[in-house]
Image (tube, grey):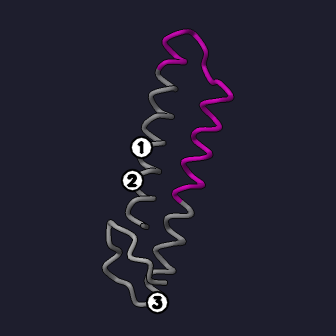
């Protein structure tokens, strides 16, 4: 599950960067929606890192791609 959150954060950040280029293309230097997407990606990545520490705390070093239902 943690790996999935990392992938989701990276993809969301890629969307935010793409929105930045679109904003620059149409003359907007910074749009509020782009800033919100960057903040959301950073917060999601923080949650993914917290999940990594929880996995390490409970001895789950493998961090499967598919959620196994174990704590």
In this view, 67 is above or below 38: below
User: What is the span of residues highlighted in magenta in the rendered image?
Assistant: 22-45
Q: Does the magenta stretch mainly form a helix, a strand or a loop? A: helix
Residue drawn 51% across and 26% down? 20
In this view, 15 is above or below 59: above
Q: CA distance from mark 1 to mark 3?
A: 28 Å
Q: CA distance from mark 3 to mark 2?
A: 22 Å
Residue drawn 34% across and 83% down? 61
Residue drawn 46% across and 89% down? 58
Q: Which residue is mark 2?
A: 7
Residue 63: percent from the left, percent from the top?
35, 75
Q: Secondary structure at mark 2?
A: helix
Q: Splitting the image into 4 quarters, where does residue 55 fall?
A: bottom left
Which badge, 1 or 3, comes first in the chain's sequence?
1
Residue 13: percent from the left, percent from the top?
47, 42
Q: Residue furthest top?
A: 26
Q: Which residue is mark 1?
A: 11
Q: Secondary structure at mark 1?
A: helix
Q: Splitting the image into 4 quarters, where does residue 26 fall?
A: top right
Name the foreground residue: 28 vs 57. Answer: 57
Q: Which residue is mark 3?
A: 58
Quarter occupied by the N terminus: bottom left
Specify whether residue 29 is painted magenta.
yes
């Amino acid at each position: 599950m943690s790996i999935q959150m990392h992938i989701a954060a990276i993809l969301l950040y890629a969307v935010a960067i793409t929105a930045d280029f679109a904003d620059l293309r149409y003359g907007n230097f910074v749009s509020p929606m782009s800033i919100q997407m960057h903040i959301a990606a950073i917060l999601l990545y923080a949650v993914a890192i917290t999940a990594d520490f929880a996995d390490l705390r409970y001895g789950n070093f493998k961090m499967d791609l598919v959620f196994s239902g174990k704590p």
